[in-house]
Image: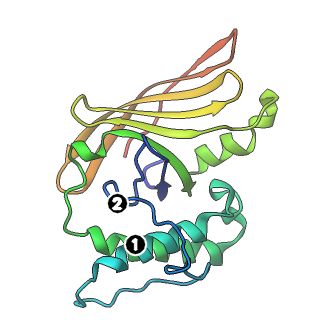
Amino acid sequence: MATSTLSFSSPSPHRDSTSPRTPRPTPSPSRPRPPRHRRSPVAAGRSLRPGESLRAKANLLALISDQDRGLRTQRDPSKRAEIVAAIEALAVHGKDAVTTGSSLSGTWRMLWTTEKEQLFIIKNASLFGTEAGDVLQVIDVEKGLLNNVITFPPSGVFFVRSSIEAEPPQRINFRFTSAVLRGSDWEIPLPPFGQG
């Protein structure tokens, strides 16, 4: 689990990880939604206009909107490549930003991932008689904590605690410290494994 591509978003009061301080664009007649499969390449050395990051973000959100958090993407390598290209295009807009500070702290909702363990749990939630609910990361940079949470309504949860260490300007190192699968009247502790 050393490397994965995650795209997180959430309505207020949560944050949207594709742009922590920028509100999500709302389609309107004066600002139509970009085409669903448009790429946003940014040529090296070209100056970036403010609206370009919003368009790149809207493009990424459109590409992942029908991918069932990444489950469908597993079977479609060309779609995965298109989404990864859109993530890279958006990353250009934050290449000089510090992303390891307090603005990272908050509760983030996962919209899309390539992380196989998370996708396995989401796909197989029916084994527990439910389906996966919210998939969240709760980050507290100051306290050095990261919690991964997959909910199973009405009362189940898979919860993984991690310690984190910021490596400015744009890297966070993590180490899993505990994991538990919990239902309404039962709990199974699991051995934590992994770092990255």
Q: Distance between the residues labelled 1 and 2?
A: 8 Å
Point 35% across, 37% down: residue? 139
144 and 194: which is toward the camera = 144
Can residue 88 be spotted in the picture? no
Considering every residue shown, the one lying at the far front of the view is 29
Q: In this view, does 70 lie above or below 88?
A: above
Q: Is residue 148 above or below residue 110?
A: above
Secondary structure beneath dot 2 equals loop
27 and 52: which is toward the camera = 27
130 and 32: which is toward the camera = 32
x, y percentage for residue 14?
Answer: 43, 42
Asked if the residue under mark 2 is in contact with the one under mark 1, i.e. CB atoms within 8 Å, the reply is yes
x, y percentage for residue 158?
Answer: 59, 28
The label on residue 92 is none
Mark closer to the chain start, 1 or 2: 2
x, y percentage for residue 116?
Answer: 60, 50
Point 53% across, 48% down: residue? 110
Q: Name the residue under label 2.
A: 22
x, y percentage for residue 26?
Answer: 50, 66
Within the image, what quadrant is residue 127 found in? top right
Tag 1: amino acid: Leu
The label on residue 54 is 1
Q: In this view, does 12 lie above or below 149?
A: below
Q: How many labels does the image show?
A: 2
